[in-house]
Image (tube, rainbow, N blue to C red):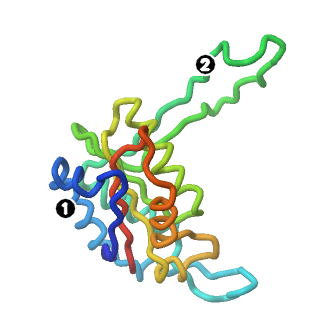
Amino acid sequence: MKVVARYDFNNGKQFVENNYQIELNEIISVISRIDASLYKTKESEEKTMIGKILFSPSELNKAFKREFSALSWVHQKVICNYTNGIFSPDYKPAKASRVKPFRDMDFLKPGKKIGIEVQFGKYSFMVYNVCAKMTIFKNLGFIDAGIEIVPVKNFADEMSTGVSYFEQFAWDLEKRGVSNIDIPVLILGIDS
């Protein structure tokens, strides 16, 4: 795969290049080492493309995990401890499940404050990653900048319907503008 587009959100490009050039080089290297053709394995059951062989987002994610792990990037999970006192006195919360609620970031580089999210999902997840999750992980002290890796439209068109893509995401972020809580994020558009 290769990086074919970049979007600079809140000065993310300059911030990452000035502070994390080594990590950015690793990220681009990881992307270039993944042969997307190996993961065109999903047979569509969708009405509009029955039987068509598509790229498998879950298999692509596994490939990214293998490559980033080999370079000592780690997955970061944070348990959500909900604050007592935010509910009205007459509210009775449900019993806690055995699975604790959490937030996670795909990859962090130990000793550095740069986080990566790889997203082959719905549009809402891309927006959540950049406009909420990365800010949360900054406030928790894990990162000060982020990189979001997403498919461009040509690549997304060869996945299941509903996978969002770089062009729409960049347009929406541009029209949304930057808030005072947003962190610098470089968005990389990749193609197979």
Disc 1 element: helix
Place of residue 84 in the rendered image (x, y in percent of width and height, measured from the top left): 64, 15
- Of the 4 image quadrants, the one containing the C terminus is bottom left
Q: Position of residue 51 (x, y in %)?
A: 66, 88
Look at mark 2 in the image and give the residue it sits on: 83
- Left-right relation of 28 to 167: left
Q: Dot 2, how many residues are within 10 Å of its Cα: few (below 14), some (14-19), or many (20+)?
A: few
Q: Which amino acid type is shown beneath numbered disc 1?
A: Asn
Q: Quadrant of the N terminus?
A: bottom left
Q: Residue at x 35, y 51 (%)?
A: 10
Q: Determine which of the numbered discs, if any, sits on residue 100 in the image.
A: none
Along the viewing direction, whichever of 174 and 63 lies nearer the viewer: 174
Q: Quadrant of residue 7?
A: bottom left
Quarter of the image where one finds residue 13 = bottom left
- For this view, does 135 lie left or right of residue 101? left
* Observer-nearest of 74 and 139: 139
Amino acid of disc 2: Thr
Measured along the vertical axis of the image, is residue 22 above or below residue 152?
Answer: above
Q: Dot 1: within a 10 Å radius of its alpha carbon, few (fewer than 14), some, or many (20 or more) residues?
A: few
In the rendering, at what x and y percent does residue 145 appear?
Answer: 31, 45
Q: Which mark is residue 25?
A: 1
Q: Residue at the location (42% across, 54% down)?
A: 117
Check the image and report above or below for 161 versus 146. below
Residue 43: image quadrant is: bottom right
